[in-house]
Image (spheres, grey):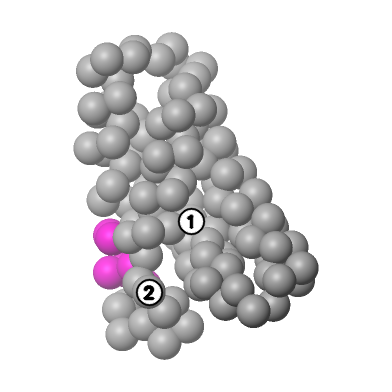
Amino acid sequence: MIEVALAIAYTMIDTFPQDPLSSPLSKEQQKECTLACISPLLSGYLSSFPLTSVELEALPTLCLSRIAQSVTLSTYSFSQNPDNTYLLDSVARGTAVLRLLLDPLVEQEYKAAFTQ
């Protein structure tokens, strides 16, 4: 189960606009780009590895937790190696995804994307 949570979390980060601070996309477009990856990844995974309803219910939280962990680890890694500016991109996009998905207007739609 953790495999699909990791795949979804990192795909959401990767599909978010490259520079979330100066993105020309509206919040609605950012939401669509971010949520669009959930169904295909989850459907593919479930076709081979069925999950219980309890496991499916936990997936949104697992994905958010992994994104938060990634942001935290990238921030720490940058503090240890400030020449590695690639890490700042991960922090910016991960933080933007968390802010988007935890917005009360988006959160329910995010959780609903995990229902098959």
Query: Visible in this render: residue 91?
Result: yes
Amino acid type at circle 2 is Gln
Relative to residue 102, is residue 62 depicted above or below? above
Q: Quadrant of residue 3?
A: top left
Relative to residue 99, is residue 107 depicted above or below? above
Circle 1 packing at 10 Å, graded few (<14), some (14-19), many (20+), is many
User: For this view, does 25 lie left or right of residue 7?
Assistant: left
Question: Magenta region, mostly helix, strand or loop?
Answer: helix
User: For this view, does 19 lie left or right of residue 64?
Assistant: left
Amino acid type at circle 1 is Leu
Q: Can you give x and y, in whole percent of width and height, for residue 71 in the image?
A: 62, 59
Residue beneath the point at 28% across and 69% down: 29
Distance of label 1 from label 2 (alpha carbons): 17 Å
Query: Visible in this render: residue 103?
Result: no
Q: Which residue is mark 2?
A: 18
Q: Can you give x and y, in whole percent of width and height, for residue 93 in the image?
A: 48, 67
Q: Nearer the viewer, residue 38 or 13?
A: 13
User: For this view, does 52 lie left or right of residue 34?
Assistant: right
Residue beneath the point at 56% across and 38% down: 61
Which stretch is magenta?
27-33
Q: Nearer the viewer, residue 50 or 86?
A: 86
User: Is disc 2 placed on a helix, strand or loop?
Assistant: loop
Q: Quadrant of residue 4?
A: top left
User: For this view, does 105 lie left or right of residue 33?
Assistant: right
User: Is disc 1 placed on a helix, strand or loop?
Assistant: helix
Residue beneath the point at 26% across and 51% down: 36
**Number of numbered discs:** 2
Relative to residue 88, is residue 113 depicted above or below? above
Query: Considering the image in quadrants, where does the C terminus appear?
Result: top left
